[in-house]
Image (cartoon, rainbow, N blue to C red):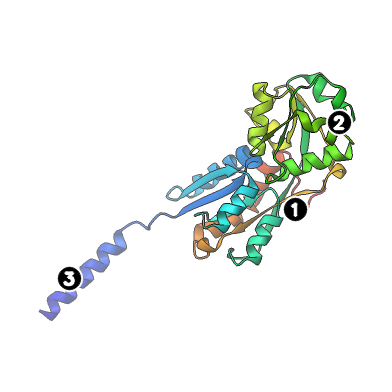
Amino acid sequence: MFLRLRHLAAALLLGLAALPALAGELTLAAAADLKFALEEVAAAFRAAHPDDRVNLVFGSSGKFFTQIQNGAPFDLYLSADISYPRKLVEAGLAAGEAHPYAVGRIVLWSLDPALAKTALADLPQAKIKRFAIANPAHAPYGLRAQEALRHAGVWEALEPRLVMGENIAQTAQYVESGAAQAGIVALSLVLSPTLEGKGAWTLIPADWHEPLEQGFVILKRAADNPLAAAFSAYLNGPEARAVLRRYGFVLPGEGG
């Protein structure tokens, strides 16, 4: 009997060893300005990890911050403002430190090339009924747009004409659809395959607003998830950095 049990146990172990390793899974909460760039990065990562699942959810950095505080099941958080990941570290909701991955830029964009070339200071006199920005209350790109308009001295004059997107991707949709005649959006979006060549845009000087220093953090629930560590390392690698650079991001260690 004992010998038979030994043989059965050995057979079971051999059978388990022959099974494929369980696939890993990762869910990322990412700022909306990353939609096209991160989709490219994730596609390349998936190609190197065909048995694993990488899920991308895009939205407002501030809203994701609140959701994570309330227990949302995300593994990585890529914010358009590194202060949010740092606050999660301070609150004990992260598995490690927050890391910068890029600095974003904002542009004045319109389907009307003449409007896109208008100086911010002249916008109140332009033929604009609706002007789009992301909501400054929870979208870092919206806050930087507000700062740039204040720098130009036109925030109060434009405020009655503002339409505010829940995130910067929705803000771009307002301009693309004609719901707003112009707006301040992310450079990474107007360089995307979907919007490139539509209308025109003008880069807003970086010193007209606080830096859009963007950062990511592995969240506490993914502390023991090797796929989270692998994706984080890939994000800092040359292939991912090349994609981010192509979408107009300034990268850590590189000049603006």
First along the sequence among labels 2 and 3? 3
Q: Can residue 123 be seen in this view?
A: yes
Residue linked to disc 3: 8
Above or below: residue 171 compared with residue 104: above
- Furthest-left residue in this view: 1
First along the sequence among labels 1 and 2? 2
In the picture, the quarter occupied by the N terminus is: bottom left
Above or below: residue 188 compared with residue 230: above
Q: Do the residues labelled 3 and 1 touch (CB within 8 Å)?
A: no
- Type of the residue with mark 1: Pro
Q: Where is residue 11 in the image (x, y as percent from the top left)?
A: 21, 67
Q: Where is residue 143 in the image (x, y as percent from the top left)?
A: 75, 44
Q: Can residue 191 be seen in this view?
A: no
Residue linked to disc 2: 120
Distance, label 2 to label 3, CA atoms, is: 78 Å
Residue at 60%, 47% in the rendered image: 30
- Type of the residue with mark 2: Leu
- Tell me, for residue 252, which label it has, or none: 1
Q: Label 2 neighbourhood size at 10 Å, few (<14), some (14-19), many (20+)?
A: many
Q: Label 3 neighbourhood size at 10 Å, few (<14), some (14-19), many (20+)?
A: few
Closer to the observer: label 2 or label 3? 2
Residue at 65%, 39% in the rendered image: 167
Distance, label 3 to label 1, CA atoms, is: 56 Å
Closer to the observer: label 1 or label 2? 2
Residue at 83%, 39% in the rendered image: 148
Residue 19: quarter of image: bottom left
Provide the secondary structure element on which disc 2 rests: helix
Q: Where is residue 150 in the image (x, y as percent from the top left)?
A: 86, 39
- Type of the residue with mark 3: Leu
In the picture, the quarter occupied by the C terminus is: top right
Provide the secondary structure element on which disc 3 rests: helix
